[in-house]
Amino acid sequence: MSERRFWSKAFLMFGGLLIWAAHFMFVYSANAVACARGFTHITVLGVGLVPFSVILATLLALLATGYLLYTALSWSGPLRGEANDDPASAFLRQITIVLTLIAMIAIVWNALPASIVTPCT
Amino acid sequence: MQPFRKIALSLTSAAASLLLGACNWTQSALAPRGSHAEAIDQLTWILFIGGMLIFLLVVAFLTIASLLRRSLKGWMANYNFIIGFGILLPVATLTAILTFSSVVLNTIHSAQPKMRIEVTGEQFWWRVHYLDESGTIKLATANEIRIPVGTPVEFILKTQDVIHSFWVPNFAGKLDMIPGRVTKLTFSATTPGIYRGQCAEYCGAQHALMAFYIVATTSREFEGWFAQQVGNPPEPTTPFLARGQQLFLSFGCGSCHTVRGTLADGRFGPDLTRVGTRLSIGAGTFPVNIGTLAAWTSSAQHLKPGNAMPSFGNLQGEQLRAIAAYMESLK
Amino acid sequence: MTVVYGRDGDRTTKRSNVRFPNTVPRPQGEIERLRVPWAPPRGWRIFSAVNNTYVGLTYIGTALIIFVLAGVLAVIMRTQLAVPENTLVGHSLYNQLFTMHGTMMMFLFAVPIMEAFGVLLLPNILGTRELPFPRLSAYSLWVYAFGGLAFFSTLFFGVAPDGGWFMYTPLTDARFSPGIKSDMWLLGIGFIEIAAIAGAIEIMVGFAKNRAPGMTLDKIPIFAWALLIFALMIVFAFPALILATILLEIERAFGWPFFMAEKGGDPLLWQHLFWFFGHPEVYIIFIPAAGMVSMILPVMAQTRLVGHRLIVLALIAMGIISFGLWVHHMFATGLPPLSLGFFSAASMSVAIASGIQVFAWIATIASGRLRFTTPALFIVAFIAVFTMGGLTGVMLASVPFDLQAHDTYFVVAHFHYVLVGGMVLPLLAAVYYWFPTVSRKPLSERVGKWVFWLFFIGLNVAFFPMHITGLMGMPRRVYTYLEVMQWDLLNVVSTIGAYVMATAIALLIFDIVRTFRFSFENNAGNIWNAGTLEWMRTYNYGTRSIPEVDSRYPLWTQPQLSNEADEGRYYLPGTLTGQREALVTSPIDARPIYVMQVPGPHWGPFLAATATTAFFYLLTLKLILPAFASGIVAIAFILWWLWDLDHGPVREPAHVGGDYVLPVYMSGPVNHSWWGTVSLLLVAGSFVICLVFSYFFLWLVNPAWPPVGVTLPSLAWPGVAAVLYAASSGAVLLASRGLSAQIQRGPWPMRLLLMLASVLFLAAVSVQALAEGQTGLRPTMHSYGAMVYMFVALQYFFAGVLVIMAGFTLARSLAGKLDPVRRVTFDNTMLLWHYATAQGIVVLFILTLFPRALG
C-alpha cells in the first residue's frame, strides 16, 4: 500500500468517531449556550431550538458517517487497495467499517435524550 | 408504573432486611421515602437485575470456555459470537437503559414546588432559611429541616465557602452547592419519619461530621411546628436559667449566634433560637441534652477539631451547666 | 509465495521459498563490533545507562515500590475505618492519607507502570533494538523516580496535600488551603506530567518507525496497539491537567481569579479541565492492561487470538469515545439535564468497546485449551471482576442512579473493581508472564497460586460490601463515621479484605526478592511457548539481527527465528557506524528506510532529572532563586546530552540485508525526531485548545465580557503583533533557505535570520502584553484579565523555548555541526517556530474579535 495514502486511510479509519466527536461537541455546546443565555424559549418549526439543533446535527452526522460507510464497503476512494491480497488494506477497511457503525450508534444515542429530557433546569 | 413501583419498594425492603439485618435505614437510598428516591429505586432494580444477569452470563461463558471440551464450546470461538454478544446485546440493552434513564431524569426535573427552603452549606454546618414566595426569610434555623409529607419542596442550595453537597438518600439524589451558583432541588416526602442527610462533597477537615436531620410530618404537625418555631422562645422560668441566659450573653455567644427575643443577634454561626427542639448538635454529630450542650460549648475543638466554633474552655462547672441548661430550655 | 488463511479469517503470506536477507557465515569480528557500543556502563556508572532494558526495569521497580507504599496508606485508612468513631488516625492525617493514596496510585503508579512495561517490552515486541529517544526515557525515569519518592516523603514532613486526588477548588485555593500542601500536589505532579508525555512521544514514534520488516499494520501485536492508543490519549488528555494545575498554582500564588466566583471565575472550570483529563486517564490506565491480556491469553490457551481486528478497533473506539465522558463525574453539579443526558449516552457507548473485548477473550479461550497457570488465573479473574466493575459503571452512567451513588462508597467500589480488577490483575499476570524474559528463573507457580487466591478473595471481600455501604448512606472521604449509623459490619468486612490483599502482595514481594536474578542473555526462556517477538533470544543489543516477520505470531510460524537471527541471517547483523543503531521502517508496510543512530549512555538525563526535581520542589518551598538556578542547570544538562546527537551522515549508505542499501541519516519528515517534535506540537496544541475552551467557558458564566470598566486595546496593537509574528516565521523560512544554500552563501545568512526571528517573536509578544497593559487591564481584577494575560504568558513561555532552541541551533552552526544535509536540529526548531507564531496569530484573532463581536 502506498505510504502517501497512509494519512487518508488512517483518518478514514477513525473518521466516523471524529464525526461523532464533532456532533457531540456541537450538541453539548449548543445546549450549554442556550441554557446559559436563555435561548430555549425560541421555537423552530414548532420544536424548541435545542431539540431542533440536535436533530439537524444528527441528520448531518449520520449522512457523513453513512457516506464513510459506503466508501469503505464499496472499497472506493482512498480505501481502494492496490492489490487484493494486501492484508494491511483489508485490515484497515474492516476496522473502518465496524468503527463507523459504532460511531453511528453513538450518534443516535446522543440524540436520544434530546427527545426526552428537558433542556435546562 | 405504579404497581411496578410497589413491587420494587417491597423487593428493596425484603432484600435489605434479609441481607443486612439490623441496620440504620434513616440515611439509605435503599429505603426510598420520597418522590425522587422511589423513581430512582425502580430504575436501580432494573439496572441491578439486568447487570446481574449479564454478569452471570459472562461467568457462565467463561466457565464453559475454560473447562469444557472443544466439541461443546466450538460455537463460541468465532466472530459471530463476539459481534452477537459484544455488540448486538449491549446495543439492545443500553438503548433500553438509556431511554428509561432519560425518562426518569426528565421526571425528577419537572416537579412544581409549593414551598421553598434555602439551605446554605458552610464549613461544617447547614444554614436553613424557610422562604416565602417573594424570597423573604420567614424562619431561620440550622442543621435541621422539617417538611410536610406530600408537598413538593424546593430546596434552594447555596454555599458560603467551598463546594458542599446536599444529600438525603431516603428522599432524593444529591445536588452540589457551588460558589457563585444557586442550584435547586424539588422533591416531596412520601412517608413520615426522621431521616438524616449528610454532606456528600469533600469540604475539608470535618466533612465527615457535617450532617443534618430532616423530619417529614403530616401537614398539620408541620403547621404546628412552624408556628412554634417562628415566634420568640419563652423567657427563662427559673433563676438558674436566667443566669444561664445572662452568661450566654456576657460571654459573647451573641456575637456569633442569634436567639430571637434577646440581644444575641450574631449571624456567623447557627441560629440557636430553638436549639432545644433539635435532634442534634454539631451538625448531626451528637444528640441534644444538657451534657452534650455543655461539652460542645466548652470543647468544640476537641470534639470536632477544625470547625468554626472555638472551645470555651474558660467556662467551668456551674457557669457551664447554667448556659447548657438555658440552651436546652430554648424550645 | 503461497497464501495461507489463518483461523480467524485473516490472511497471512508465508514464504515457501525462503531466502534470507543476509548470507552466513557472517564476517569475522562483526558480532564483537556490535557488542562494544551496546555494552552497559560498569559499576556505579549504570546510572548513566539509557538502554531500554535497564531503564524499563528500574521504571517498573520504582512503580512497584510506589504501589506498595500507596497500598500501605490504604491499609492504614481501612484500619481507621474498621470501627466507628475510631481515633487511630485524626482527621488531618486521614485527609492526607486518602489524597496521597489516590494521587500516588493514579499518577505515580498506574500510568508510569504501563509506560515502564512499554519501555521494557515494546522494542522487543516490535522486533527492534531500542526506542527512538533513549536518553529521553532515561530522563523520564529519573524525574519520575526522584519526584515520586520525594512526593511520598511529604507525608513525613506534614506537608502532604489533603484536598483529595482531584483537588476541587475553592477548597484547594489559597484561602481555604493556606500553606504549601496543595502546592506540593500541584508542583509535585508537574514532573509526572513531563514523564508521561516523554514516554508517550517515544511510544508513538517507536510504533510508527521502529518495527521489524514485514510487520505490517495487520500484524502488529495488540499490546503495541494498546500502547499507541495509550500514548495518543496521553498527548491529548494530559495537557488539560497541565493547564488546570498551572492555573490553580497561579491563582494560589498570584491571585489571578480563574476559579474564584466572586471575581468572575468558576469552580466548575477546574472540574471541567480536570475531568477532561481525568476520564481519559482511567482508560489510559485500562487500555494497556487490556492489551496485556490480549497478549497473554492466546499463549495460555495455545491458540491465536480470536477477533484480533475487533479488539484493535475496540481499543481505538474506547480511546476516542472516552474523551466524551468527562461530565459524568459532574452529574450532581446542577448542570442542565439535557447536557447530562448527552454524557450519559456517551458513557454507555464506551461499554460496547468493553463488550467486544470481553467476548473476544472468551471466544479465544473457547478456541483453545486453557492451561491454568498463574497468569491464566489472573486473566480469568480479571474478566469476571472487570465485567462486574463495567456493569456498575453502566449503572453510574444512568444519571438518576448516579445522583444517589455519586460521592459514596458505591463509587469507591466501582472504581476499585475496574482499576484493581481491570488493571492490577492483568498487571500481576504480566509480572508472572514476562518475568522469564528478564530473570534467570521464573516466579514460583506454587507461591503464585497462593498470591492469586489471596488477592482475588481479598479484593472481593474488601470492595464488594462497599456497593452496599454506599447506598446505605456512607459518603466518600470520611475519616470516621458515627456508631449510630450502623455501618460497622460492612466496614470491618472491607478492612479484613484489605488485609488479605496486603498479605497477597507481601507474598508476591517475597517471591520476587528470592527469585529475581537479572539476566536477559541467560533468562529462563520461552517457558510458555509464546509466539511473539519479545520471546526471541536477546542480548544487550536486542536480537543479533533484526528479524523479518510474516505473521502475527512469528515464533509459531517461523520456529527457527531465534537461531536464524543469532546467525545474522536477517537485517543489520552488525553495526555500520561503530555506534548503537536501529532500523527505521515505514509506518504501514514496515519496509526498511534508513538506519538511525541510537544515543548511548550519558550522564545528562540523570543529572537533568535531579535538577528538574530540585526546580519543582524549591519552587514549592518558595525558594525562588535556588529554584530558577536549578531550572537553568536542568536545561543546561539537557542541552549537553542533546549536543551529542544529530550526527549527520557519518558514512555513506550501506547494505543492511536483502536489496536494501540504506543511509544512516535522513532529515525532513521521514526523520524520527521530526515525528517526535510533531508529537510535542500536538501536546502544545491540546494545551492551547484547553485554554481557549476555558476562555469561552468563563465568557458563558459571566454576564458581561469583558466586564464593565474594561476597555479593549485599539485594533492597531494586535495588528502590529500579528505582523511581527508573521515576520518572525518568515525570517525562519528564509533562514531555512539560507541553510540549504549554505555552501554558496556561507552560514551567516541563516544565523542572522534566526537571530532576527527571535527578536521579532519577542517583540510580537511584548506588543501583545503592552497592548493589554496600557488599557489598565490587570490579571488579578477579574477572570477576563487573568485569561488574557494567561495567553500572553503562554506566548512568553514559547518565546523562551524558541530563544533557547535558536541559541542551540546557532551554537551547532558555529561549531560546524549544522549544514545543508545535517540539519535535523534546525528543522525541529523551525517546526516549533511556525507552530508558535500560528498559535500567536490565532489567539490574537480570538482575543481581539470575539469580545467585539459580542458588543
Image (cartoon, coloured by chain):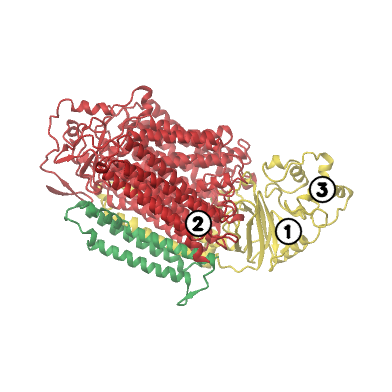
Chain colours: A green, B yellow, C red
Amino acid at the residue labelled 3: Phe
Amino acid at the residue labelled 2: Tyr
- Locate residue C351: give its quadrant: bottom left
What residue did someone put label 3 on? B248
B252 left or right of C610 in image: right
Q: Position of residue A115 (x, y in %)?
A: 45, 69
Q: Residues within 10 Å of mark 3 (few under 14, many from 20)?
A: many
Q: Residue at x 27, y 56 (%)?
A: A8
Element marked by disc 3: helix
Q: Position of residue B290 (x, y in %)?
A: 78, 46
Residue B281 visible in the picture: yes
Name the foreground residue: C464 vs A61: A61
Of pointers 3 and 1, the one earlier in the residue sequence: 1
Q: Nearer the viewer, mark 2 or mark 1?
A: 2
The disc label shown at residue C301, or none: none
Amino acid at the residue labelled 1: Ala
C636 left or right of B113 in image: left
What residue did someone put label 2 on? C695
What residue did someone put label 1 on? B140
Q: Is residue C699 above or below residue C315?
A: below
